[in-house]
Image (spheres, grey):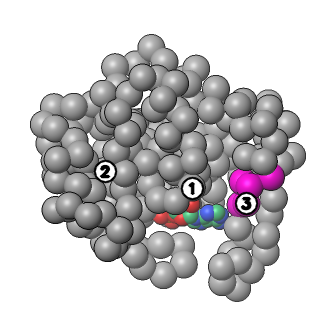
Amino acid sequence: MYDEIEQRIRDVKDFPTKGIVFKDITPALGDGKTFAEIINLFYERFKNVKIDKVAVVEARGFLLGAPLAHKLGCGLVLLRKPGKLPYESYKESYDLEYGSAMLEMHVDAVKKGEWVLLIDDVIATGGTMEAACKLVQKAGGEIVASAFLIELTFCKGRDILEKYAPVETFIKY
Ligand code: AMP
């Protein structure tokens, strides 16, 4: 269904650690038509939904979520790795498919009652996006959905995230 996009997603074995097959989206982003097609997939899915802000997960989530927020006319919220945000921030730690990590969000990035759409490139275990959901909830935000270009279904991350809000993915492996 999304052949042109799928053809430009490259499998890189044993990156960043042995046993991981990394889904490299840079060839898809590097082709203008494919990049536009990807952003359009998200746009068509969410254009008629009430969304105040699009929250994007560092780093590849930024690449998809920022153009989407612009196209939707929504504000952008950065969910960043530790120590990158300059102002007072909420913090959430989580487990990754490879290691553990933390996400941070400015305390004033989301206001109470705002509807927030969460975006990242890949869902694996769901740990990263669960931390993102918790950050938005800490600020009093409502989660519209979490949406990803790629779902690694065998990692079952969807089971965790559906406790927070609907999960939307376009390409499944
Ligand atoms: P997880 O928290 O396990 O759902 O992992 C999702 C986060 O790690 C996303 O930010 C992805 O960009 C990245 N990630 C995890 N596994 C992969 C993979 N196999 N290929 C590309 N990115 C991945």
Mark 1 and mark 2 lie on one chain; the one further toward the N terminus is 1
Of marks 3 and 2, the one in the foreground: 3
Return the x and y of residue 151 as percentages of the image width and height: 61, 50
Callout 2: SS: helix
Q: Quadrant of residue 127?
A: bottom left
In depth, the one of 107 and 129 nearer the eye is 107
In x, y percent, where is residue 130?
A: 36, 57
Q: Marks 3 and 2, how far apart in space?
A: 24 Å
Residue 144 shows in the view: no
Q: Which mark is residue 6?
A: none
- Mark 3 — residue? 24
Q: Is mark 3 within 8 Å of ligand 1?
A: yes
Residue at 21% in and 31% down: 114
Residue 15: in sight, yes or no? yes
Circle 2 is placed at which residue position? Answer: 133
Q: Magenta segment range?
A: 23-27
Between the residue at mark 1 and the residue at mark 2, the CA separation in whole angstroms equals 17 Å
Toward the viewer: 115 or 72?
A: 72
Q: Nearer the viewer, residue 153 or 145?
A: 145
How many numbered markers are drawn? 3
- Whether disc 1's CB lies below 8 Å from ligand 1 is answered yes
Residue type at mark 2?
Cys
Q: Earlier in the sequence, mark 1 or mark 3?
A: 3
Residue in view at x 14 percent, y 42 percent: 140
Q: Residue furthest bottom?
A: 18
